[in-house]
Amino acid sequence: MADRAVKMAEAGCKYIAVLGVDFMSENVGAILDQADFKKVGVYRMSNELIGCSLVDAAGSLTYMQFWRQLQIHLLHCM
């Protein structure tokens, strides 16, 4: 995504909107800065936290119980 943003900046784009979680827009901004396109504006389409379903799932009780059960089975295999 950031590589595409650099190509857009090279083509004259002055503003780039990023759809996705906040770290994606931060990454695009950092890569543009590194490529000497510091004046190109990078914006997220939402100022609210989008979240990440993988992170949400990893924090759930069901997920933790899954790993506890797996750990028990692994200990028995040893």
Image (cartoon, grey):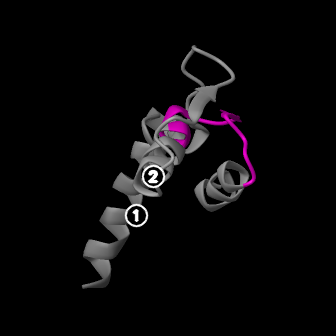
Report how far apart the C-alphas of labels 2 and 1 lie in the structure: 49 Å
| Horizontal and vertical percent position of residue 78 | 24, 85
| Amino acid at dot 1 | Leu
| Amino acid at dot 2 | Asp
Residue 50 part of the magenta-drawn span:
no
Tell me which corner region of the image, top left, top right, bottom left or bottom right, holds residue 17.
top right
Q: Mark 2 points at which residue?
A: 36
Q: Is residue 71 above or below residue 76?
A: above
Camera-nearest residue between 74 and 53: 53
Residue 16 part of the magenta-drawn span:
yes
Q: Is mark 1 on a helix, strand or loop?
A: helix
Camera-nearest residue between 20 and 35: 35
| Horizontal and vertical percent position of residue 77 | 32, 83
Q: Which residue is drawn at 69% across and 23% down?
A: 45
Q: Which residue of the protein is positioned furthest toward the front in this rendering?
A: 12
Q: Residue at x 33, y 74 (%)?
A: 74
Q: In this view, does 33 lie above or below 46?
A: below
Q: Earlier in the sequence, mark 2 or mark 1?
A: 2
Q: Mark 1 points at which residue?
A: 70
Locate the N terminus and report the quarter of the image it occupies.
Answer: bottom right
The part of the chain drawn in magenta is 11-25
Q: Is residue 6 above or below residue 75?
A: above
| Horizontal and vertical percent position of residue 35 | 47, 57
Tell me which corner region of the image, top left, top right, bottom left or bottom right, holds residue 4.
bottom right
Determine which of the numbered discs, if any, sits on residue 25 in the image.
Answer: none
| Horizontal and vertical percent position of residue 31 | 47, 53
Q: 24 left or right of 45?
A: left
Q: Is mark 2 on a helix, strand or loop?
A: loop
Tell me which corner region of the image, top left, top right, bottom left or bottom right, holds residue 48.
top right
Label 2 Cα neighbours within 10 Å, binned few <14 / some 14-19 / many ≥20: few
Q: 59 left or right of 9?
A: left
